[in-house]
Image (tube, rainbow, N blue to C red):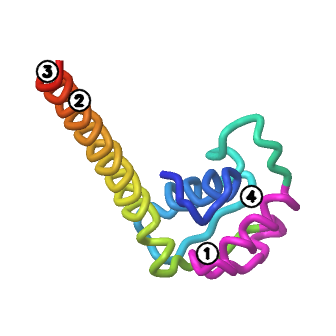
Amino acid sequence: MISDRLNRRENEVMNAVFELSGGKERFLVSPGELAAVLPSGGGYDEAALGRTLRSLSLDGYFDFVESERKGEPVYVIHMREAGLGYRRSGRQRRRAVMFRWGVAAVGAVITFLVGLLLRALFS
């Protein structure tokens, strides 16, 4: 699901967060667990991941707090409405794009047929 408001890296992180949430509003996740779900070769170190999570938090997808559990860093994430509806908005956007392509294709066919009709009438 690609949102038109987010860049590629933010979309990848948001997909990973949504997948790890398992439908829950609040959950804990370690940077290692989050990095394991992200696509390989993305260059996600802990600092870059923290910056991206803060950006998504500022955009209103979730509330995010860095904490520690038994000396290990963890992220406490509380999904907001935009975060919970992330997948739904992606599906709606894809549906809207497919509708636009369909309208364009139908318009092209109609234009072609009208052109053939006009050519037959004036030839």
Q: CA distance from mark 2 to mark 3?
A: 9 Å
Q: From the image, tell me which residue sits under label 1.
A: 77
Q: Position of residue 107 (x, y in %)?
A: 26, 42
Q: From the image, tell me which residue sits under label 4.
A: 31
Question: Disc 2 or disc 1, which is closer to the eye?
Answer: 2
- Numbered-mark total: 4
Which sits earlier in the primary sequence, circle 3 or circle 4?
4
Q: Is residue 41 left or right of residue 16?
A: right
Which sits earlier in the primary sequence, circle 1 or circle 3?
1
Q: From the image, tell me which residue sits under label 2.
A: 115
Q: Is residue 52 magenta?
A: yes
Q: Is residue 105 left or right of residue 38?
A: left
Which sits earlier in the primary sequence, circle 4 or circle 2?
4
Q: Position of residue 29 (x, y in %)?
A: 64, 64
Quick check: marks 1 and 3 in contact, CB under 8 Å?
no
Quick check: marks 4 and 2 in contact, CB under 8 Å?
no
Q: Secondary structure at mark 3?
A: helix
Q: Callout 4: few (<14), some (14-19), or many (20+) C-alpha neighbours within 10 Å?
A: some
Task: Name the amino acid type tagged 2.
Answer: Gly
Q: From the image, tell me which residue sits under label 3.
A: 120
Q: CA distance from mark 2 to mark 1?
A: 58 Å
Q: CA distance from mark 4 to mark 1?
A: 12 Å
Which sits earlier in the primary sequence, circle 2 or circle 1?
1
Q: Which residues are magenta?
A: 46-73
Residue at figure coordinates x 77%, y 77% from the top left:
67
Q: CA distance from mark 1 to mark 3?
A: 66 Å
Q: CA distance from mark 3 to mark 4?
A: 68 Å
Residue at figure coordinates x 23%, y 29% from the top left:
115
Task: Name the amino acid type tagged 3.
Answer: Ala
